[in-house]
Amino acid sequence: MNQIGLFINGEWVKTNQKELVLNKATGEAIAEICVAGPDEIDQAVTAAYTAYKKEKLAPYRRYEILKRASELLMERQEDLGLTIALEVGKTLQEAKGEVARAAQTLLVSAEESKRVQGEIVPIAGSPGNENRTAWTMRVPVGVVCAITPFNVPANLTCHKIGPAIAAGNTVVYKPASATPIIGAKLCEIFVEAGLPAGHLNMVMGPGSVVGEALAKDERIAYYSFTGSAAVGMNLKNSVGFRKVSLELGSNAPTIVHKDADISRAAESLTRSAFANAGQLCISVQRVYVHSDAYEEFCAKAVALTKTLKMGNPLDPTTDIGPMISEKEAIRAEQWIQEAVAEGAEILVGGHRNGPFLAPTILTKVQPKMKCSCNELFAPVFNIVRYDNIDDAIALANNSNYGLQAAIFTNSLDLAIRAAEELEAGGVIINDPSTFRADLMPYGGWKQSGIGKEGPRYVIEEMTEEKIIVINK
């Protein structure tokens, strides 16, 4: 069984405390990770801080490293995809797709490393400043702490490490304990790509221990966290005036209006709702369908769901793999049962076998049911009938979250209205809420978080703006 050490200052470090990493489909142990203690956490931050202070990388060198790392990801797509399929449980096709996206994220980061720039400030246009010239410049913040989730462990890691390096920062990285193997392989790739020792360090262990220790270390200037709202809020409260970016949860709404292509909407939303067993922050969860299209939409969504195969993620014919753990599958099943007890109906699915929860569609779901108002993070979505578009928009906005929302319509007026009125960081028109291009700005409102991802946009947050003024 593979043993994974901590990665500190270019070296793999072993510790006495260990945790197992499981194959999510079988429960078999596939790796053993070393858990960081206070000394190792301090060493990792020290290495990153020292590297930042003593070994600056020129912008073009950052470009070369990130570009080579992107190439290595694609050269090893099969192996990395297999790793993700085993430790996450997503299908092999989805896993290899994630690797390709991660490579693109690094490639975009590489290009952006050459474009970190300020601007001329026309200060002479104000009275008394005729002899002065001013401009801004962006400088790295220093040490970036990257804390990533289990569900998209390669691409979301690259969304943090890639821009951090592109901006000239160094990194202390904490992967999710359930999915650390891909993180170790990414560290190896960055080293092979030419990243010097200390510029990327990886520590592992429970968030309640490792995460809290990292939050208290004031040598860290910026925190990029993806995870639950509760943990994100705790991190924000712990770091004080230091900068933080939080990508948290969602219960993404979609409106399907009567003028939409119903067949297209039903297929697109159903497949997206069950991608990665529903374990995506922007997974389709609440679907509001106009009464004129309701019966057709439900029939098509149920028919497609019944054709989906659930099983071994390594089988190329599998559509849906296991959830991250049986515990999470039990939790989702209980929410379904609770909703049914309160008046909801199951159109398809609803049963569980270990960590495998059958793809499930609910209807007659009320806004206060957990399956509606909380983040499901499971292969389940709700179909709710509406008659008036004003009501649909109000229902979509009736949430503590606001990451991404979507609408299917052939009306330009309605599309523009939805873009203006839906309360979310992103509004997707005639595509599911799960749509994300890795170069676009991505971030939420309300309890879905603060800050943006997307290399160009997060680089602005991972740098400080400085004004320079010269008096001639």
Image: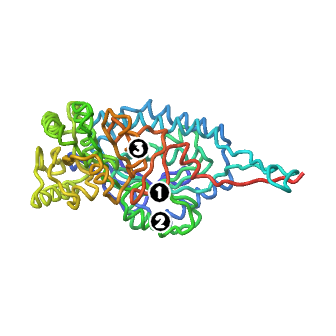
Mark 3 vs mark 2, foreground winner is 3
Q: Identify residue for label 3.
A: 419
CA distance separating discs 3 and 1:
20 Å
**Regarding mark 3 in the picture, which secondary structure is present there?**
helix
- Residue 406: image location, x then y, percent: 34, 43
10 Å crowding of disc 1: few (<14), some (14-19), many (20+) = some
Are circles 1 and 2 on residues that touch, CB within 8 Å?
A: yes
Residue 380 visible: no
Percent of width and height locating residue 421:
39, 49
Q: Which of the 4 quarters of the picture holds residue 53? A: bottom right
Where residue 450 is drawn, which disc sits there?
A: 1
Instruction: Give the residue type at disc 2.
Output: Lys
* Pick the front one: 294 or 56: 294
Q: What residue is shown at x 37% (from left), y 44% (from top)?
A: 418
What SS does tag 2 mark? helix
Secondary element under disc 1, as helix, strand or loop, is: strand
Q: Earlier in the sequence, mark 3 or mark 2?
A: 2
Image mark for residue 236: 2
The 10 Å Cα crowd at callout 2, few under 14, some 14 to 19, many 20 or more, is: some
The residue type indicated by label 1 comes to Ile
